[in-house]
Amino acid sequence: MVLPDGADADPLGLIAAGARAVIADEAELGAARAAVLAGGSYLSPAVLARLAPSEPVETVRLAPREVAALHCIVAGLTHREAARELGVTEQSFNTYAKRLRRKLGATNKAELTRRAAELGYVPM
């Protein structure tokens, strides 16, 4: 989905609703296509930057494995795929995901992605 500047839509809501990619302009189409074809999703850095808070945010400390799990979630991997990627059981990955949602104050993957970007755990 192309979401031009000034569009009145929630990009994270679009991802949560099932959109596989949200980009700012067609120049990002190649990167979005590659991410989707690899089984992930893509949220344009330009679109993500529009969501950045204007006030400083608190520091949240994550363990290295939590950061790795967070990157898998942001990349759009399923819990099974992410567990395989990290070399852990799906049960262990579910524990990472629950802990991340609690630490970052998120109830779903879209909120988790937004908070991860706000806190600098994923590039904008």
Image (cartoon, helix red, strand yellow):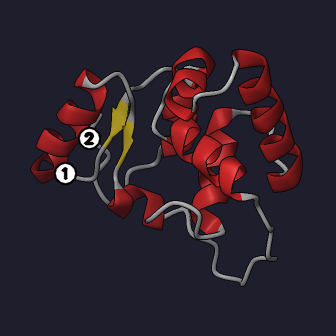
Instruction: State whether residue 18 is above or below residue 75.
Output: above
Q: Nearer the viewer, residue 2 or 91?
A: 91
Quick one: which residue is furthest to the front in this view? 87
Q: Is residue 46 left or right of residue 2?
A: right
Image quarter where the N terminus lies is top left
Give the residue at x 39% y 29%.
40
Tell me the amino acid under the disc marked 1: Asp
> How would you rate the neighbour count of disc 1 (Cα within 10 Å): few for under 14, some for 14-19, many for 20 or more?
some
Helix or strand or loop: what does disc 2 sit on? loop
Q: Nearer the viewer, residue 15 or 9?
A: 15
Q: Nearer the viewer, residue 64 or 13?
A: 64
Proximity of marks 1 and 2: CB atoms separated by less than 8 Å: yes
Disc with the residue nearer the chain's start (1 vs 2)? 2
Tell me the amino acid under the disc marked 2: Val
Residue under numbered circle 1: 25
Residue under numbered circle 2: 2
Give the residue at x 57% y 69%.
52
